[in-house]
Image (spheres, rainbow, N blue to C red):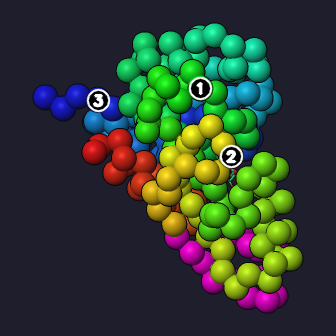
Amino acid sequence: MSTSKNIAIFASGSGSNAEAIFNYFKGDGQVKVSRLLSNNMNAYALTRAKNHGIATMVFDRKQFYEGQEIADLLLSENTDLIVLAGFLWLVPETLLRAFPNKIVNIHPALLPKHGGKGMYGMHIHRAVKAAGDTESGITIHYVNGQYDDGQIILQECCELDASDSPENIAGKVLKLEHHYYPQAIDKLVRS
Ligand code: GRF
């Protein structure tokens, strides 16, 4: 009897990574996305979740940083892995303690380069371009109390041309995200 595994996803924005994960596990008998949570009531990620029949929750700073409401909810739902997919807030101690080594994130650069506070979205790809880097890529890592600082799980690279704009770089990196994040999550949640 295979016990089912539950994944909770946190997203603040568009949710294309979340949707790639929904699609990857669609019809999987053992693993499912049990909930999508967001700090942004306008996040398109919420619409994507609803389109897939996935439960959602919107929360504010007070709910996220004070009390145990969200940790208790995810514990009550037997969440096995928490996946940050374009989630912009630092994770509070309550959640880190409730889910030790069970929270992962994807950063669209090759950490430790181009990480830390304020380094998200196009800020990253502009910095990569400005640095004249000849490659970029993704970093999937465990989450701790700092931005982009936890133990690295996986990195994948893409070559950059001098002619690549920050937008081209973002496109190349997003393709890697959509391809590798679901696979990495699959390995983590079944291990
Ligand atoms: C992605 O680039 C991801 O690496 C970063 O934020 C972006 C989210 O994109 N964490 P989306 O919301 O998944 O489309």
Residue 165 within the magenta-colored segment of the rendering: yes
Give the Cα separation between the discs numbered 2 and 3: 31 Å
Give the Cα separation between the discs numbered 3 and 1: 27 Å
Residue 90 within the magenta-colored segment of the rendering: no
Amino acid type, residue under disc 1 in the picture: Glu
* Residue 170 as seen in the image, left or right of residue 185: right
Residue drawn at 40 percent across, 43 percent down: 25
Residue drawn at 77 percent across, 29 percent down: 40
Q: Nearer the viewer, mark 3 or mark 1?
A: 1
* Residue behind mark 1: 93
Q: Quadrant of the C terminus?
A: top left
Q: Mark 3 or 1 closer to N-term?
A: 3
Mark 2, other Cα within 10 Å: few <14 / some 14–19 / many ≥20: some
Mark 1, other Cα within 10 Å: few <14 / some 14–19 / many ≥20: few
Give percent across and percent down for residue 121.
Answer: 78, 55
* Residue behind mark 2: 147
Give percent across and percent down for residue 190.
Answer: 29, 43
Question: Is residue 147 or residue 128 the one in the foreground?
Answer: 147
Q: Nearer the viewer, mark 2 or mark 3?
A: 2
Segment colored magenta? 156-173
Q: Is residue 70 above or below residue 181?
A: above
Q: Is residue 162 above or below residue 96?
A: below
Q: Mark 2 or 3 closer to N-term?
A: 3
Q: Quadrant of the N terminus?
A: top left
Give the Cα separation between the discs numbered 1 and 2: 13 Å
Give percent across and percent down for residue 147.
Answer: 68, 46
Mark 3, other Cα within 10 Å: few <14 / some 14–19 / many ≥20: few
